[in-house]
Amino acid sequence: MKSYTITVNGNVYEVTVEEGIKTSPAAAVQAAPQPKAEAPKKAPAAPQPKAEAPKKAPAAPQPMAAPAGAEGSVKVSAPMPGKIISVKVAPGQEVKSGDVVLILEAMKMENEIVAPQDGVIAAVHVNAGSSVEAGDVLVSLD
């Protein structure tokens, strides 16, 4: 027999373990160990909501395809994975450095993705509602 002292959530328990005894599953259930030291009483835990079966996500809208040869030389990429909330620019629109080109939601936060330099929007590669991964090209500029 081996004796162990175990602390769980601030409660100290003295546990004795017997080795090499084979028992049926019904006999394996033992009485709960008695606490060694009196611990402060805690409020009962709030009931946990029941886990629901995962719901199938709706199909994400397909990104707008840029016309052949319309891709710009400056690419604005997604800094993190997320969902496009809104696109603030259109192809042919002039933008200044720091202008918001789209809003990316990541971890329940709305992040403004801005133009890195002055230019003209050559192509918008995503739609509102699209899911993107880090590094995906969102917009390209000339």
Image (cartoon, rainbow, N blue to C red):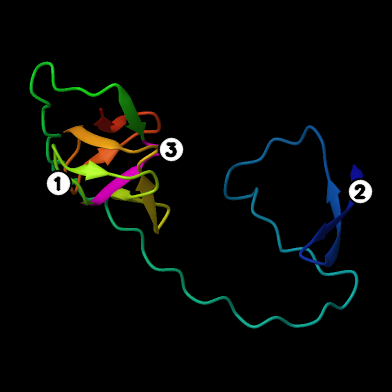
Say which quadrant the C terminus sits in. top left
Q: Work out how far the residue at label 2 is from the one at label 3, CA to CA, in angstroms.
A: 54 Å
Quadrant of residue 69 in the image? top left
- The residue closer to the viewer here, 100 or 22, is 100
Residue 32 inside the magenta-drawn segment:
no
Q: Work out how far the residue at label 2 is from the one at label 1, CA to CA, in angstroms.
A: 55 Å
* Vertical comparison of 118 with 74: above or below: below
Q: List the residue tagged with mark 3.
A: 79
Badge 1 marks a residue whose secondary structure is loop
Tell me where residue 56 appears, x and y as whole percent.
19, 46
Badge 2 marks a residue whose secondary structure is strand
- The residue drawn where x is 72% and y is 64% is 32
- The residue closer to the viewer here, 60 or 110, is 110
Q: Identify the amino acid type marked 1.
A: Pro
Q: Image check: 4 left or right of 121?
A: right
* Vertical comparison of 21 with 27: above or below: above
Quadrant of residue 31 in the image? bottom right
Q: Residue furthest top?
A: 69
Range shown magenta: 78-86
Camera-near label (2 vs 1) is: 1
| Cβ–Cβ under 8 Å for marks 2 and 3 | no
Q: List the residue tagged with mark 2.
A: 3
Residue 84 inside the magenta-drawn segment:
yes
